[in-house]
Image (cartoon, helix red, strand yellow):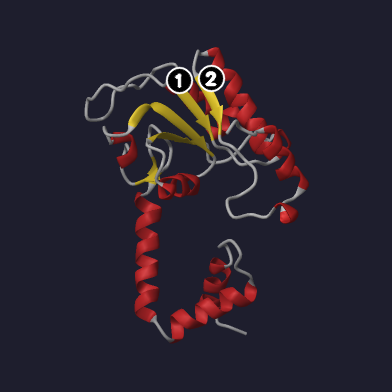
Amino acid sequence: MFSPLIEDLIRALRCLPGVGPKSAQRMAMYLLEKDRDAAGLLASSLQQAVEKVGRCSRCRTLTEEAVCSLCKNTRRDHTLLCVVETPADVLAIEQAGNYHGLYFVLHGHLSPIDGVGPADIGLDLLGERLAGSGDESESGAEHSGITELIVATNPTVEGEATAQFIAERARAKGVSVSRIAHGVPIGGELEYIDGGTLAHAFNSRTVL
């Protein structure tokens, strides 16, 4: 129905999460028919990002610098390290505004069935961080050693397995390990909460 170039554009847009054939077609038609300036800006920005954005050598989040701004920030608590699955998790925690330590991004979770092992998610590099290697920042400032590892992987079967794996190895290096709490959300009503979440909330209850 469409020319080869338009078909290629629609196919490319379908790689985005949640975008099906119809949505991709509408996006392509909008950009080509109504806003070619935006299409050009999108293409240029995407090309620049693909060429220049990589991973921070310390925390592995996405950045165009060798060491990201969070890792270089001397005002953050360099004794705290929060382990997350994706760069989007870093953004979510930063937007919450109550954590001021450092991060380590796994870019996934352990999944033996899919052939994803410890090295595939950077756990060898995490081990080096916990052992104290690389404690000097790019600016030359000395960092204190990690005293607490906060595991903030997702509350899925794979996320929990990954958390346990990380915790065992961190404790073996003498690092204190904590897990972010999961349970009833603020503003939630118990009658609408699933059983698994309620069970986790009861098991993780705290003293008032």
Q: What residue sits right under mark 2 in the picture?
A: 170
Q: Position of residue 35 (x, y in %)?
A: 39, 82
Quarter of the image where the N terminus is located: bottom right
Q: What is the spatial separation of the Cα atoms under label 2 and label 1, in whole angstroms?
A: 7 Å
Kind of residue at disc 1: Leu
> In front here: 205 or 109?
205
- Is residue 113 shown above or below 123? below
Q: Position of residue 9 (x, y in %)?
A: 52, 72
Which of the labelled discs sits on residue 105, or is there none? Answer: none
Kind of residue at disc 2: Ala
- Is residue 195 shown above or below 5? above
Quarter of the image where the C terminus is located: top right
Seen at 37% across and 52% down, the residue is: 51
Is residue 130 visible in this depiction of the protein? Answer: yes
**Left/right of residue 153 with respect to residue 51 in the rendered view:** right
Seen at 48% across and 82% down, the residue is: 30
- Is residue 154 shown above or below 142? below
Q: Position of residue 79 (x, y in %)?
A: 38, 24
Q: Secondary structure at mark 2?
A: helix
Seen at 59% across and 28% down, the residue is: 118
Q: Secondary structure at mark 1?
A: helix
Seen at 38% across and 60% down, the residue is: 47
Residue with the most extreme right position:
195
**Left/right of residue 168 with respect to residue 55 in the rendered view:** right
Q: What residue sits right under mark 1 in the picture?
A: 130
- Count all numbered tags in the image, as a single digit: 2
The reply to whether the C-beta atoms of the residues labelled 2 and 1 are less than 8 Å apart is yes
> In front here: 81 or 118?
81
Q: Position of residue 150 (x, y in %)?
A: 50, 30
